[in-house]
Image (cartoon, rainbow, N blue to C red):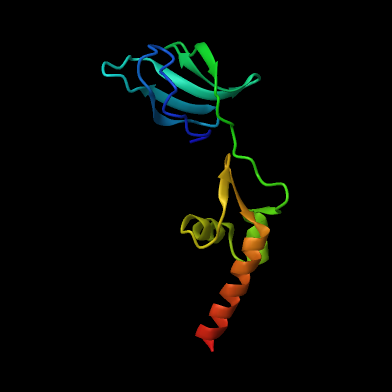
Amino acid sequence: MNLHTLPAEVKCTFCGKGGLAFVRERGSQGDLYHSTAATPCRGLSFHCRTRRGCGVSAETAGGQRLNWMACLTPERPPIEETEEHLTTLQAAVRLRVSKKKVIGLVSHGKLPGRKIGARWLMPAEALRLYNQTATVRHRVSGG
C-alpha cells in the first residue's frame, strides 16, 4: 500500500453501503479499493493525496474523481522527535552491510523499525544495541 490502511468505518464512495477492501496500488498515485457491500457496486474508490490532503474518492471509468472525502486518520504515523532515526542506507553504512540486509533484518524482527511512506526508519539507539550484540555473537561463535 502506498498510503495508510483505511479504517473499517469508511464507506464506499460510489454506493455508500459497504466498506472498502484493498485491490492494488496504482503506481505512486495511490491505492484502489472496491466495495464490500452484500451486493457490491462495480465502482472503484481511489485513496490518494491531493492539495487538500489525504482522502478517498469515487473513480469513474474515464478516470474522473467524484465524491472526494478527507481521511480522518493521519497520513503517516508521527515520529518521536526526541529520538534519532536512520534510513536503510544510513543503517547499512553503520552496520557495514547492504541495504537489502538491513531490510531483511527489519522484516524478520531482528532490528526494530517502522515503514513511513515508502521508507524504512530505524531508531539509532536500537541500531547501536544491535551492533553491539551482533559483534559479541560473532566473537563467541568465531572464537
Q: Position of residue 64 (x, y in %)?
A: 50, 11
Q: Position of residue 26 (x, y in %)?
A: 48, 28
Q: Nearer the viewer, residue 77 or 56?
A: 77
Q: Relative to 105, is 21 on the left or the right?
A: left
Height in image: 34 above or below 67? below
The quarter of the picture where residue 79 lies is top right
The residue located at (63%, 63%) in the rendering is: 127
Q: Position of residue 77 (x, y in %)?
A: 59, 39
Height in image: 30 above or below 103? above
Q: Residue furthest left?
A: 38
The quarter of the picture where residue 17 lies is top left
The quarter of the picture where residue 133 lies is bottom right
The residue located at (44%, 22%) in the rendering is: 10
Q: Nearer the viewer, residue 69 or 135?
A: 69
Height in image: 130 above or below 75? below
Q: Nearer the viewer, residue 32 or 112?
A: 112
The residue located at (44%, 11%) in the rendering is: 60
Q: Nearer the viewer, residue 122 or 9?
A: 9
The total of numbered circles placed on residues is 0
Q: Position of residue 124 (x, y in %)?
A: 67, 59
Q: Quadrant of the C terminus?
A: bottom right
Q: Relative to 129, is 16 on the left or the right?
A: left
